Image (cartoon, grey):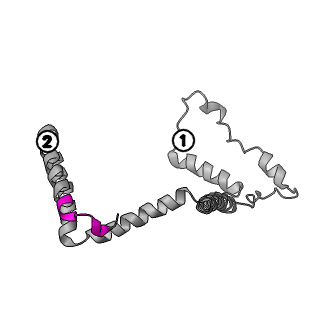
Amino acid sequence: MSFDQIAWLPLCAGVTGVGLVLSFLSMRRRGVVAGLRGVAWSLLPLAAYLTGALPTLWQIGTAVVGFFAGAVFSPMVWAGVAVTGLSLVLFLVTGVLRGRRTAASAAPAAPAAAPPAAPGRSVTAGQAATQPLPKRPAAPAGKQSEPARKPAADDDFSDIEAILKRRGIG
């Protein structure tokens, strides 16, 4: 059936009329918002006829239907769909691999600098990691009977800073 063989004015007016009746029923059951939305949809067929957009919409519809009807029964089209799927999978895989490579190159490759060795003694990288941390000096014998005093916050952080500097961090 071609476009010219269809009586478009009665068809569009009929679809609009049925839509308006259903919109009225929808408004009574589900509220004004649902009814007004139904009215908006119902007016579109008549608007398409009156503006002359109907022949264009007919051509678009027949082209889409023809494309999908040809796609369903054509092995060549299915081969194209398979190649498109393979292409998408390859894009996804390369994106994941690129992300891993970027993350690996961003990680620090060089180990931290070794602490300075004591005079007359050489320290290798393996020994630097296993050297014990220096101990704090013990309190004098006369002061042990007093309750332990909390060190100032600056004192704690200065110890941590000193340790980090000896290890070559920060």
Residue 118, position as x, y percentages in the image: 82, 56
Which contiguous range is marked in magenta? 3-11
> Left or right: where does residue 9 sit relative to residue 136?
left
Report which residue position mark 2 lands on. 25
Q: Which mark is residue 141?
A: none
State the separation of the CA atoms marked 1 and 2: 80 Å
Residue 130 visible from this viewpoint:
yes
Q: Callout 1: helix, strand or loop?
A: loop
Is residue 2 on the magenta stretch?
no
- Say which residue appears at 22% left-offset and 64% top-offset: 8
Along the line of sight, the residue nearer the viewer: 42 or 115: 42
Residue 67, position as x, y percentages in the image: 48, 63
Please, what is the dominant secondary structure of the magenta stretch? helix
- Crowdedness near tag 2: few (<14), some (14–19) or many (≥20) residues, C-alpha within 10 Å: some
What is the quadrant of residue 143 in the picture?
top right
Q: How many numbered marks appear?
A: 2
- Say which residue appears at 75% left-offset and 60% top-offset: 113
Report which residue position mark 1 lands on. 151
Residue 170 visible from this viewpoint:
no
- Say which residue appears at 63% left-offset and 60% top-offset: 79
Is residue 10 on the magenta stretch?
yes
